[in-house]
Image (tube, helix red, strand yellow):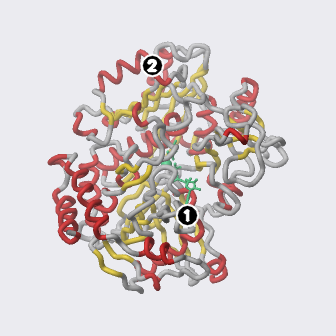
């Protein structure tokens, strides 16, 4: 098979020439094709069948133990000008990067099949959607792309019609971390990824296309590509709002997107529905509001911590037709991870007998599930709407053990952009490297913005113009800890209480405490019924520590300075104004 687009056929031929595969397969996305790939992976051992009666149609993939997370130090944005990538990215000159990758890709598919994977990010018929083609030699990648994107025939038809697509080239190579690079060429809409089979490094539609390349493209086309969940929230009167929230990797997007409200709320008629759990593309509509789509079709979610108590919707989603990566296995061949339940697995994520005494987790902390969004009980039909959904509130948040209160609201758009730019969070297992280290992660985009953060903040600021009806901006922290080291806020379903307060603020029905860092809630305006928060919790969740924030704002000022004169004056002025109020 080939396509009706000469440019695509020519590119596939060129890559085949370079990589020397034994076979070329154009993916149509059909069930039969998927069944064949699965059969082949079962035969070669790259997939293991899980318990068919408890988890029908589900499989386990164990990755190479050195290939379990994104590799930020090996991820590059290759723009002509170094400054266009910015201090927030690793940069390599495009020619140098291309030469390096050409050497790695030469002959790398000998003995393998080259898969051509046409995909569409977003509903097939949405004007906000964008297409790409990933060439890969990994059947695991193909199976995952089929779940995570609209992959196959319909995407190819759109690509043929439009004539434009992002070119992604991927090979697992020999999985040697010394020969691993994730290169982005945003100016020519190209991605080249070598030496990893892990999600964010290998499923090129996700972080590489839908965030790094798309953010670059969005800047010139007047829209935003963000690391955000999108949820729908319906009040007892039947009025529906949509909220988008940016939290860094493994900081609660999937959980918030699938939230089940506390009992009293459900009884009263509140409902949360899920549009997306990781990526949000939004642009202003004719009415001045921001309209958002989820460019993905599935969830590549963190397994550890997912339980019937913390996230029943996720757990229900992954009972069938799910690919698990790097989880543990029970004696009756069911997938298992820390936080799921009290059972003790027999096999760890590497396939070794599990030794509970050793003190190391059975599932990898970044073990994941891949599942179609359609299997999620809370999945909203509007997620398929070509026009997207109008956003009423944007939420930023990080994992902050100290200082940052439960919730506060920006005074206006500029202040909100500063709150996003100033985001800090403790690192997690989603990327290789140390865990629990506080770093700046503006808008949860530190690893994903395909251009200079200074220009990115300027782009965000530019949405505040005549006729715009922009969402309110909030900041949350579910992860504040007490002196005993435990979380002070129950989190998960109880986060509904904070969402309700946000809607009251959107409606203008409650006041707030005006502070230099923004509007803090009057605790009486947040429904805390049934929660037994002690004095320490009340104080740390709802007060702000002036001295601590003065130090934080000084550090935010230093951070903004790292970007030099490109940093928008309006943002620096806002930071300085707040500094002045705090000191
Ligand atoms: P990526 O897929 O990496 O972008 O992550 P994500 O932001 O979707 O994170 P996810 O919702 O999967 O949560 C990651 C971890 O945070 C899990 O172990 C959750 O159990 C935990 N978590 C999520 N929400 C909360 C919360 O409200 N409170 C607490 N304490 N932990 C939470
Ligand atoms: C993240 O790390 O933010 C993820 C997982 O959502 S990955 O797709 O691997 O980037
Ligand atoms: Mn993510």
356 with respect to 429 (left or right): right
Q: Give the mark nearest the N terminus, 1 or 2.
A: 2
Q: Badge 1 is on which residue?
A: 382
- Residue 413: x percent and y percent? 29, 67
SS under mark 1:
helix
Q: Residue at x 54, y 80 (%)?
A: 528
Q: Residue at x 34, y 37 (%)?
A: 186
Using the image as rendered, state which of residue 124 and residue 101 is in the foreground. 101
Whether residue 113 appears in this view of the structure is: yes
Q: Residue at x 73, y 37 (%)?
A: 355
SS under mark 2:
helix
Placement of the N terminus among the 4 image quadrants: top right
Mark 2 Cα-neighbour bin, 10 Å: few <14, some 14–19, many ≥20: few
Which image quadrant for residue 458? bottom left
- Residue 248: x percent and y percent? 45, 52
436 with respect to 149 (left or right): left
- Residue 157: x percent and y percent? 53, 40
Cβ of mark 1 under 8 Å from ligand 1: the answer is no
Q: Disc 1 to disc 2, how far (Cα)?
A: 40 Å
Residue 14 is tagged as 2
Q: Is residue 348 above or below residue 421?
A: above
Whether residue 156 appears in this view of the structure is: no
Q: Are marks 1 and 2 in contact (CB under 8 Å)?
A: no
Cβ of mark 2 under 8 Å from ligand 2: the answer is no
Using the image as rendered, state which of residue 310 and residue 172 is in the foreground. 310
């Amino acid at each position: 098979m080939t396509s009706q687009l000469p440019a695509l056929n020519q590119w596939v031929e060129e890559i085949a020439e370079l990589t020397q595969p034994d076979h070329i397969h154009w993916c149509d996305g059909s069930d039969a094709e998927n069944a064949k790939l699965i059969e082949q992976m079962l035969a070669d051992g790259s997939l293991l069948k899980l318990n068919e009666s408890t988890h029908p149609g589900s499989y386990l993939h164990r990755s190479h133990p050195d290939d379990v997370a994104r590799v930020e130090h090996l991820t590059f944005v290759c723009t002509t000008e170094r400054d266009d990538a910015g201090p927030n990215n690793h940069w390599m000159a495009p020619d140098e990067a291309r030469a390096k990758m050409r050497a790695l890709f030469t002959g790398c598919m000998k003995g393998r099949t080259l898969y051509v994977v046409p995909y569409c990010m977003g509903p097939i018929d949405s004007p906000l959607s964008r297409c790409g083609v990933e060439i890969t030699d990994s059947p695991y990648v193909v199976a995952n792309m089929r779940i995570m994107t609209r992959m196959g025939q319909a995407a190819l038809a759109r690509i043929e019609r439009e004539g434009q697509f992002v070119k992604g080239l991927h090979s697992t190579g020999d999985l040697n971390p010394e020969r691993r690079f994730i290169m982005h060429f945003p100016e020519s809409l190209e991605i080249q990824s070598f030496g990893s089979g892990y999600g964010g490094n290998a499923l090129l539609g996700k972080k590489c296309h839908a965030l790094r390349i798309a953010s670059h493209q969005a800047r010139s086309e007047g829209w935003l590509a963000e690391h955000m969940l999108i949820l729908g929230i319906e009040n007892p009167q039947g009025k529906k709002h949509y909220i988008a929230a940016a939290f860094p990797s493994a900081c609660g997007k999937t959980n918030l997107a699938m939230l089940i409200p506390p009992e009293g709320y459900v009884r009263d008629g509140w409902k949360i529905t899920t549009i997306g759990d990781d990526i949000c593309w939004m642009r202003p509509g004719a009415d001045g509001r921001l309209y958002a789509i989820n460019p993905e079709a599935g969830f590549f979610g963190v397994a550890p911590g997912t339980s019937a108590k913390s996230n029943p919707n996720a757990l229900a989603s992954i009972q069938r037709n799910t690919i698990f990566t790097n989880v543990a296995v029970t004696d009756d061949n069911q997938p298992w991870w820390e936080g799921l339940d009290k059972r003790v697995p027999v096999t760890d994520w590497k396939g070794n007998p599990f030794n509970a005494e050793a003190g190391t987790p059975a599932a990898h902390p970044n073990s994941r599930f891949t599942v179609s969004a359609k299997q999620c009980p809370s999945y909203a039909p509007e997620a398929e709407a070509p026009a997207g959904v109008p956003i009423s509130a944007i939420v930023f948040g990080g994992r902050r053990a100290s200082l940052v209160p439960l919730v506060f609201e920006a005074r206006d758009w500029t202040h909100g952009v500063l709150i996003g730019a100033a985001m800090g969070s403790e690192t997690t297992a989603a990327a290789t490297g140390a865990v629990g280290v506080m770093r700046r992660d503006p808008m949860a985009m530190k690893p994903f913005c395909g251009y200079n953060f200074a220009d990115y903040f300027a782009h965000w600021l530019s949405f505040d113009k005549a006729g715009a009806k922009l969402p309110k901006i909030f900041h949350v922290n579910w992860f504040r800890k007490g002196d005993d080291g435990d979380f002070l806020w129950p989190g998960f379903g109880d986060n509904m209480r904070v969402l309700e307060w946000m809607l009251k603020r959107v409606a203008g029905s409650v006041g707030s405490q005006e502070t230099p860092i923004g509007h803090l809630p009057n605790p009486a305006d947040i429904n805390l019924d049934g929660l037994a928060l002690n004095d320490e919790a009340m104080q740390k969740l709802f007060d702000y520590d002036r001295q601590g924030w003065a130090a934080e704002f000084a550090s935010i000022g230093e951070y903004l300075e790292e970007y030099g004169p490109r940093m928008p004056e309006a943002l620096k002025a806002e930071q300085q104004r707040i500094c002045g109020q705090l000191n």
